[in-house]
Image: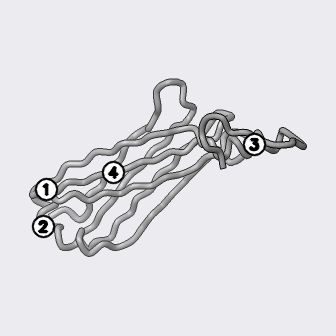
Amino acid sequence: MPDVIFVQSGPINFDGGVPVGGWSNVAIYPDGRYSFSGHFHDSGEIPYETSVIWWIKSKSGTVFTFGNHVSMGGIFTSGNADFALNGVNSAIAAAWGDLSAGWTSNWSSRASIDLGSLWDSVKASLGAVGSIVAVVGALA
């Protein structure tokens, strides 16, 4: 039996000129411990929200998921977002024999503009205003 199952994304990049990149990985252990970590960087001016999800599927079909969502402020604030989520899950320990018999994994990640943070920076630059009318889209 293996003493760890470790999966890593390699570089995560997005199409369409999105200035966000990063990486993520997951390690799970026979006693149910897990470590889910990653790093994203926004090298543009606009704030972005980024999500990543991993799944590890045992030979019999049990799926273990690991997901996280991070916010980045772009180059004018903190453009980095690191995360490290560690813990113990008894279902991993209970399924270790099945996982040891065979497993598959994959991940998916998305990045989108953080309209709330973008709106906050626009408001800060507006100065004194009378009223604001949101014509399309809700802004916090």
Camera-side mark, 3 or 2: 3
Please tell me which of labels 4 and 2 falls first in the chain: 4
Q: Residue at x 64, y 41 (%)?
A: 47
Residue at label 4? 54
Camera-side mark, 3 or 1: 3
Looking at numbered disc 1 in the image, what kind of residue is underneath it? Answer: Gly
Camera-side mark, 3 or 4: 3
Return the x and y of residue 17 as percentages of the image width and height.
54, 25
Q: Quadrant of residue 75?
A: top right
Residue at label 1? 61
Point out which mark residue 121 bears. 3
Point out which mark residue 97 bears. 2
Establish if 26 lies above or below 130.
below
Looking at numbered disc 2 in the image, what kind of residue is underneath it? Answer: Gly
Q: Is disc 1 surrounded by few (<14), some (14 to 19) or many (20+) residues within 10 Å?
A: few
Please tell me which of labels 1 and 2 falls first in the chain: 1
Left or right, 31 with reference to 25: left
